[in-house]
Image (cartoon, helix red, strand yellow):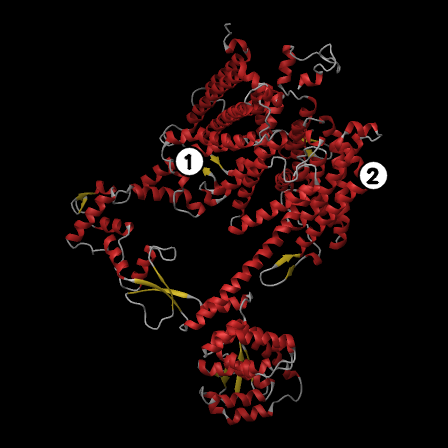
């Protein structure tokens, strides 16, 4: 309590220390009160100190500062009978606020009862302070560590003019009531009034109420609030744990561990034998037991509990889980409240998980959409796709180096990344892929060669260490709904970007000349060519478009991931999975694939949050099995194009 | 009809075996342990490892060059083989060390204490002291040796069965094999999977029971073993692809549907070759990692399997000796360039340091080989032997329209 209020009081004192600079500050009322009650200040009693404290508090800010120092045991008496506040090396007169250099005050040591009274008086004065900031700080300090005295002060205080502060105060009072009120009915009512609340503070209040400890006894303990009886061997209490409990309560002998046995035997080696058994034979556990028995028989070692004795001891006792809280009505109410809180919590965790999954899905979608165009629409495998993502991210990094304004640089980086990767994609198509038409495996290998070369090139240019691509300020932070549900702004932005790209892709494919021609070439290149479409040019443009989108995805990914030369590699397999799972040749398939993979990854991860590697492993296994049942993906390609 | 023996039908087998024997003999005579000492022990190890890689490349060629499956998961089998033998090497050696230290105790250790000690020693780095279930047989060399071929074999069998029965083909299959490798690598990376996470297994170059032999002689022994394995595997692979079985396998590569319509159980053929290749790769791995001394999940990175494909492609796929040539040439060049021994090219404005630029050169060379020399280095051999198809400038091979095109015949 004192630790928690200290910063606040220190701040008050620091504020008051500025006052000596102002003229005519001396607090005559305080001076009078202090002078009249010197003996009370020196030797306060919990029962009688109340009125004095009220008097001091009523004298104004200096009085409050004095009380703060008193409660903090920073109040001292000088030899000439003045009351001094000691703050580290600085000593000031409590009444005048003037510094007293070289003083050697006799420190006052009020007992905890007195300090409790002082503190609640202080809080009472703070929560009715005219300054809302101080009121808010006081509530915060109570929320950190409230006591029964605070509860009384909160109940007694006049209503707060600020409705938000009043709401906070009411909540705080309810929480303190649950913890500290004497009357069970009031506490239960308080618990029920907050039923289903999922706030961290409420859960923090409930947990100690429901904390249990395990005890072993021969009969049910009298007057204890028993949560349940345990039977040894259950999940909650293993036999070993039960025996340890007996040992801890001093009921049972320690059992002989293998190490203790070995040490005992080693201590009693005589003529190369222990208890008549040669040392060389002691590599056999049975021989060790015999040797120990022999030592026990001669009284050289203390008898230890055998397995059978341990068993008997466990059987002779019953094991209970007992609440620390004695009142069973309160614990019942708390259990019910916790259960309903947990149900709502579970639902909210589900929502949170859904948001996470959505954002992961949009990342996969962004990474895969370019691939969906090149692989899905054109049937061209581009293993260098990941490197295009990387190129986009590095373009963002370079642009950021040129333009210092984060927002502007991001706006410039997006089209710049598109341009760079578009050109790279067109070059790759003209130089390599065009010559390998209809040889998909060789296209895969050749583009892999390109990928190796590009990766090393990036390493040579930018080095191996990660380059930062910092998001502008308005993209930092998170959107928080409550203690459970929150999502970082950048992920929302990526989701928006993914939706934009979906729209853009649909627009290009369905509403533009290019899209019409792309669809025509995809369906029947020969017929398209005879209609005056140049299939080669269309393929090149499509490839450039897919690569350009990869570049933009690179900028987006670079904002939250480290930009390294291996950035693309991390996404390439997932991207292919997304396209393959979703179904080739259909943007909705890619969307479905990204959604499925995103949701499943997060769901698998939520079972064991600490082990993301396992989640990824199971994810891939799932995909391998999924392909078994839907080899053509969620939305399979139909018609003539599927034959190609 | 009596057939000529395999070797006479394929004179290349004899040449390869002779070259291999000559190479082994030469290296032995130049080694520190058995000869003049011109070749240092570290170089012998590099050569021995290269032979193992060549063996893996032969298996890759079997799968890719003859069966037409571009498997990007061969390194998974390679590493699994290494892990299986590594388990025994590490367990046996640690057991010897722990037993020696426990012998200092006044009381001799029980078997359980010994095992706890070993487990502590091996798994201390990943914060565990229990021997995982997958190490149940680590104490037994024969069982682990059997597992070297069984584990990758079963994995290939199950994976292949799942993939082939649902007719996953071509690029899809490649991506799927890559995914399998990635999944295995991610699993091995976990500390609680029982393979020491990213620490991997180490100290494999010390063979338990052969402490007195010394690395100089051990490295030559491993070279012999690798050469022997390569020779036997080459013979086996050559035998598999000859005769009727081999014809069917190549037919599957060229047109799977047609072979199926002819009544052949395509899946069975594919499974057999895929599994055989996986086992061969695993043996290569089991010989490789004791020479390398350490194995960790990074060895399974998707890129490693693709390098294998690069070697086979550069060497010339569809020719078993091409795979060997490719693996040997590219991996030795690679270690020469990345070892920092290649002289840098001083340009007036930039110094080309090969440690940095080798990958770029390899990538570009790979693209060029794919574009202009799909037969790789082995294409030179074909050219010398006059087996190149005549240039017909795109005309049909037969008199009728619809006869085989030159393009088709080449593929």
CB-based contact (under 8 Å), mark 2 and mark 1: no
Neighbour class for label 1 at 10 Å: few (<14), some, many (≥20)? many
User: Which numbered circle lies on residue A594?
Assistant: none
For the residue pair A617 and A20, the one nearer the viewer reads as A617
Q: Quadrant of residue B403?
A: top right
Asked whether the residues under marks 2 and 1 belong to the same chain, the reply is no
Foreground of the two, B238 or A501 = A501
Kindly indicate the quadrant of the structure image that contains residue A280: top left
Number of numbered discs on residues: 2
Answer above or below: position of A420 versus B64.
below
Mark 1 = which residue?
A: B87
- SS label for mark 2: helix
Task: Write down the chain letter for disc 2.
Answer: A
Q: Residue at x 56, y 82 (%)?
A: A124
Left or right? Give the position of B275 relative to A218: right
Of badges 2 and 1, the one in the foreground is 2
Q: Nearer the viewer, residue B346 or A226?
A: A226
Secondary structure of the residue carrying tag 1 is helix
Which disc number belongs to residue A513? Answer: 2
Using the image, determine if residue A200 lies above or below residue B371: below
Image coordinates for residue A482, horizontal then vertical, percent: 60, 63
Q: Residues within 10 Å of mark 2 (few under 14, many from 20)?
A: few
Query: x and y percent of residue A354 in the render?
Result: 61, 53
Where is the C terminus of chain A found, in terms of image quarters?
top right
Q: CA distance from mark 2 to mark 1?
A: 62 Å
> Residue B235 location, x and y as percent?
49, 17
Q: Specify the subunit that label 1 lies on.
A: B
Q: Position of residue B362 (x, y in %)?
A: 64, 29
Does residue B178 appear in this view? yes
**A249 w.r.t. B153: above or below:** below
């Amino acid at each position: 309590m004192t630790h928690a209020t200290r910063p606040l009081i220190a701040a008050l004192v620091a504020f008051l220390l500025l006052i000596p600079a102002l003229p005519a500050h001396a607090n005559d009322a305080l001076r009078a009160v202090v002078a009249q009650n010197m003996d009370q200040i020196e030797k306060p009693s919990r029962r009688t100190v109340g009125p004095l404290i009220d008097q001091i508090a009523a004298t104004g800010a200096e009085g409050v500062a004095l009380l703060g120092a008193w409660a903090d045991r920073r109040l001292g008496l000088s030899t000439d009978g003045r009351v001094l506040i000691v703050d580290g090396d600085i000593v000031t007169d409590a009444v005048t606020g003037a510094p007293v250099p070289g003083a050697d005050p006799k420190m006052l040591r009020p007992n905890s009862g007195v300090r409790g009274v002082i503190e609640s008086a202080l809080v009472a004065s703070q929560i009715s302070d005219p300054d809302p900031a101080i009121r808010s700080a006081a509530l915060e300090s109570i929320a950190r560590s409230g006591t029964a005295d605070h509860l009384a002060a909160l109940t007694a205080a006049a209503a707060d003019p600020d409705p938000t502060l009043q709401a906070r105060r009411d909540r705080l009072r309810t929480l303190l009531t649950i913890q500290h009120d004497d009357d069970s009915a009031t506490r239960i009512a308080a618990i029920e009034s907050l039923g289903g609340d999922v706030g961290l503070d409420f859960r923090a209040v409930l947990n100690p109420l429901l904390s249990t400890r395990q005890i072993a006894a021969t009969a049910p303990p009298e007057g204890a609030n028993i949560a349940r009886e345990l039977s040894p061997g259950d999940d909650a209490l293993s036999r070993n744990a039960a025996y340890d409990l007996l040992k801890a309560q001093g009921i049972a002998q320690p059992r002989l561990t293998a190490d203790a046995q070995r040490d005992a035997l080693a201590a009693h080696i005589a003529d190369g034998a222990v208890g008549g058994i040669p040392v060389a034979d002691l590599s056999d556990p049975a021989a060790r037991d015999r040797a120990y028995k022999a030592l026990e028989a001669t009284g050289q070692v203390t008898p230890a509990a055998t397995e059978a004795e341990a068993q008997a001891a466990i059987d002779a006792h019953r094991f209970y889980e007992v609440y620390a809280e004695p009142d069973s009505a309160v614990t019942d109410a708390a259990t019910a409240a916790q259960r309903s809180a947990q149900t709502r919590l579970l639902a909210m965790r589900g929502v949170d998980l859904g948001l996470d999954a959505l954002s992961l899905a949009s990342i996969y979608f962004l990474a895969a959409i370019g691939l969906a165009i090149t692989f899905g629409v054109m049937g061209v495998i581009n293993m260098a796709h990941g490197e295009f993502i990387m190129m986009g991210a590095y373009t963002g990094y370079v642009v950021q180096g040129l333009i210092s304004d984060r927002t502007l640089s991001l706006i410039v980086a997006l089209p710049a990344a598109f341009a760079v990767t578009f050109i790279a994609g067109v070059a790759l198509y003209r130089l390599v892929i065009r010559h390998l038409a209809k040889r998909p495996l060789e296209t895969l290998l050749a583009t892999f060669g390109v990928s190796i070369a590009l990766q090393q090139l990036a390493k040579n240019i930018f080095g191996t260490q990660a380059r930062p691509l910092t998001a502008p300020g308005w993209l930092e932070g998170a959107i928080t709904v409550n203690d459970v549900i929150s999502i970082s702004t950048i992920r929302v932005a990526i989701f928006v970007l993914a939706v934009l790209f979906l729209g853009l892709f649909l627009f290009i494919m369905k509403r533009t000349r290019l899209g019409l021609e792309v669809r025509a070439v995809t369906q029947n290149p020969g017929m398209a060519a005879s209609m005056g479409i140049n299939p080669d040019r269309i393929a090149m443009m499509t490839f450039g478009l897919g690569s350009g989108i990869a570049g933009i995805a690179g900028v987006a990914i670079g904002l939250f991931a480290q930009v390294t030369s291996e950035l693309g590699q991390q996404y390439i397999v997932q991207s292919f999975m997304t396209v393959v799972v979703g179904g080739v040749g259909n943007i909705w398939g890619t969307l479905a694939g990204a959604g499925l993979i995103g949701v499943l990854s997060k769901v698998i991860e939520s079972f064991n949050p600490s082990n993301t590697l396992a989640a990824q492993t199971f994810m891939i296994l799932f995909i391998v099995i999924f392909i078994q049942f839907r080899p053509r993906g969620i939305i399979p390609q139909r018609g003539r194009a599927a034959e190609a | 009809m009596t057939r000529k023996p395999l070797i006479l039908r394929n004179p290349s087998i004899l040449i390869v075996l002779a070259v291999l024997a000559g190479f082994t003999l030469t290296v032995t005579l130049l080694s520190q342990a058995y000869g003049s000492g011109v070749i240092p022990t570290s170089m012998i190890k590099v050569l021995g490892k290269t032979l193992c890689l060549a063996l893996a490349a032969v298996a890759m060629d079997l799968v890719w060059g003859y069966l037409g499956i571009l498997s990007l998961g061969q390194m998974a089998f390679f590493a699994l083989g290494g892990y299986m033998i590594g388990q025994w090497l590490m367990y046996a050696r640690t057991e010897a060390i722990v037993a020696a230290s426990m012998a200092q105790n006044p009381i001799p250790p029980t078997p359980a204490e010994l095992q706890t000690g070993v487990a502590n020693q091996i798994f201390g780095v990943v914060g565990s002291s229990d021997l995982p279930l997958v190490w149940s047989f680590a104490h037994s060399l024969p069982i682990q040796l059997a597992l070297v071929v069984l584990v990758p074999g079963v994995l290939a069998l199950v994976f292949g069965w799942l993939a082939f029965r649902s007719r996953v083909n071509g690029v899809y299959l490649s991506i799927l094999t890559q995914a399998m490798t990635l999944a295995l690598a991610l699993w091995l990376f976990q500390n609680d999977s029982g393979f020491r996470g990213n620490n991997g297994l180490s100290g494999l170059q010390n063979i338990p029971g052969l402490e007195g032999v010394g690395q100089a002689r051990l490295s030559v022994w491993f070279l012999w073993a690798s050469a022997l394995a390569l020779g036997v595997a080459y013979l086996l692979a050559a035998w598999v692809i000859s005769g009727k079985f081999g014809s069917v396998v190549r037919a599957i590569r060229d047109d799977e549907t047609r072979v199926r319509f002819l009544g052949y159980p395509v899946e069975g053929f594919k499974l057999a070759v895929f599994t055989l290749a996986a086992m061969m790769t695993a043996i290569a791995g089991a010989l490789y990692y004791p020479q390398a001394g350490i194995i960790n999940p990074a060895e399974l990175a998707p890129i490693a399997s693709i390098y294998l494909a690069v070697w086979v492609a550069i060497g010339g796929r569809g020719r078993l000796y091409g795979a060997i040539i490719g693996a040997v040439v590219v991996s030795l060049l690679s270690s020469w360039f990345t070892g920092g021994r290649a002289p840098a090219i001083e340009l007036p404005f930039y110094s080309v340091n090969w440690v940095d630029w080798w990958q770029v050169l390899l990538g570009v060379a790979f693209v060029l080989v794919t574009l202009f020399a799909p037969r790789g280095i082995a294409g030179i051999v074909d050219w010398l032997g006059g087996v190149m198809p005549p240039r017909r400038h795109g005309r049909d091979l037969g008199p009728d329209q619809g006869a085989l095109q030159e393009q088709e015949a080449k593929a």
